[in-house]
Image (cartoon, rainbow, N blue to C red):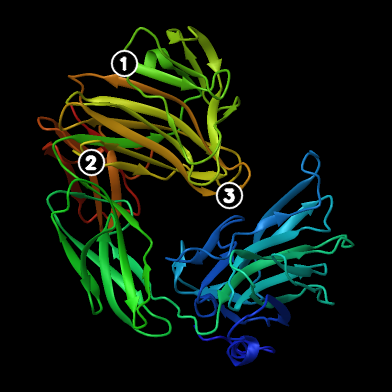
Amino acid sequence: MTPRAGPLLLRTWIAALVGGWFVAHAPAATLTGSFHPVASGSNINLTLLGKLDWVQWGFGGDLVVNRKAGITPLISNFTLLSQNFPGNPLSFSAPYWFEDPASSFCSWADGHPVVTTTSNHTRVLAYSYPIVGGSGFRLRVPAQTTTNTLLVFVGTQGARGELRATLTGQPNYFHSPTEMDVNGVYLINFAANNPGQTLTVEWTLPLAATSGNATLQAAALTAPGANNPPFALLTQPGNDASFAAPINLALNAQAEDFDGTVTNVAFFANASPLGQDASAPYSITWSNPPLGSHLLTAVATDDHGTSRSSVAVGIYVHGTNGSQAGWVTLPPSSADLTVEGLADWVHWGLDTAASLNRKSGAPEQISHFTPVGATNVLRYADNYTAYSWSDGTPTLTVNGTRTGVFLTNLSTGFQLSAPADATPRTLRLYVGAYAARGRLLAYLSDFSARPYIDQSVYDLGWDNEYAVYSIHYRAGSGGQQLLVSYVSTELLDGAWGNVTLQAATLTADSSAASPISITNVARLGDDFVLSFNTQVGRDYTVEYANSLPPPAWSKLITVPGNGALVAVTNHNATDDQRFFRLRTP
């Protein structure tokens, strides 16, 4: 990741940082700044520049943020600035990501959620209508009593920009490049005279501007003599991996120090130490982990004694005396909850955000949801599926309501539960997403079967996505619960991106057979491999065709069920594609 040469070398001002920009101590508050154009093709290596912290914006979406992993963030996310009146329905302000291959690019090797990249050209621009002037970005950084340096990579399109930096109760720095269409970096040296102060930086368009945009690419924070902490990445197992017990689980990690050497990598499960390794490749074996969900981390230590933790990886260890299978489909245009929810049903949001209707005259089995995250539950009334019922309480009969509830903000959502024991049951959950990705997690409280996890509900087009999840389950012991959560993991719209919940139904049948579903198909050379869950005492016939609809299905094999996941291989399949189905008596 060596910086590229250009009309202005990044290494010129990097050298300046260590050759005279800093003072060792700050007896009084100081705030100075300077602007430097950054040439096209220059490599902004955030790992090397941001020893204390770094942030990069726009890599994958308007609101996507990549930052230095494994530390407490010091550089804030941006706040969008606008002179538009918030209550004006004709005004609009938003960030937009874009790529500029002709400009400078960012690289890093210690990031999250993107771990490493060598040539990222993305950034964000502040779009504001109808008032363009005054739009831009605000950042905040805590100020120490010793001097730190903040590097802010900014630009303009079709306009001039201005930067204003203020230190709590102390000096201001103001600068406006004379040119339009700039691409550069501000070096801001600052120190507070007392603890607890804040540096605030704003990059905006002057009020006189009539067109154009302010852009923001990245920011990095460093200090004289700062030690870049080592970086660790848990490479095995992967996030959301599931393992049947008993097992000896291999934990592997990569570790690197960017200004020294790694002396040790320690492994942890749920913050409890498991073991350590002093030499690469770093690995240990976790013998017979207990049933349950576990958060795994790897902590690297360098030759200065500084440590940094990897991003946590969540895994699940489960038994095999229960069963669970899940699948997701598009919901119907209408659903009769009375017909579908023979054991129980629930609908949310009929009249208000707090409305809860459920099946009357039957034991309450599906719980009310608990909100996940700090946000308010809101109601909407334009859902795709129209819900009806004739045995509800407190509202007895409803015909075709399109209401539901939703939660904005990242990592918010819903969690609920249903009873679980030796009786096979099927829970159906109606959900959706707007400008967001949802993550569905369902697991048995005794972890007697593999959890079901899905992240396929993803609205990329700002036009709403809807889904119904079906979870067929049976616990390995009595008195258990099926625990379900549906939470946003990505947002494309910071203001209104959300996940939705409308209804849930439950059926139970002690004599019912589990629905059959192919859970995975993969092409390995000339072979196709597929798998599916089975029940003891049932035979499963696998059939295939080369097109849909097929002239006829061809039998591949019949296998007896053994109560576990079965894998079948279709050897020497020379066709470019094949479709498979399961049949069982």
**Numbered circles on residues, count:** 3
Viewer-side label of 2, 3:
3
User: Which secondary structure lies at badge 3?
Assistant: loop
Q: Which mark is residue 532?
A: 2
Q: Is residue 521 visible?
A: yes
Q: Is residue 353 left or right of residue 570?
A: right
Mark 3 or mark 1: which comes first in sequence? 1
Q: Name which residue lies at 53% across and 45% down.
A: 436
User: Which secondary structure lies at badge 2?
Assistant: strand
Q: Is residue 336 left or right of residue 14?
A: left
Mark 1 or mark 2: which comes first in sequence? 1
Q: Name which residue lies at 20% across and 54% down.
A: 571
Quarter of the image containing the C terminus? top left
Viewer-side label of 1, 2:
1
Residue 510 rendering spot, x and y as whole percentages:
18, 19
Q: CA distance from mark 2 to mark 3?
A: 34 Å
Task: Note whether 337 is above or below 528 in the view shown.
Answer: above
Q: Name which residue lies at 19% across and 47% down.
A: 568
- Badge 2 amino acid: Phe
Which residue does the numbered mark 3 point to in the structure image?
Answer: 492
Mark 2 or mark 3: which comes first in sequence? 3
- Badge 3 amino acid: Leu
Q: Which mark is residue 343?
A: 1
Q: CA distance from mark 3 to mark 1?
A: 38 Å
Q: Residues within 10 Å of mark 3 (few under 14, many from 20)?
A: many
Q: Quadrant of residue 62?
A: bottom right
Residue 488 rendering spot, x and y as whole percentages:
48, 44
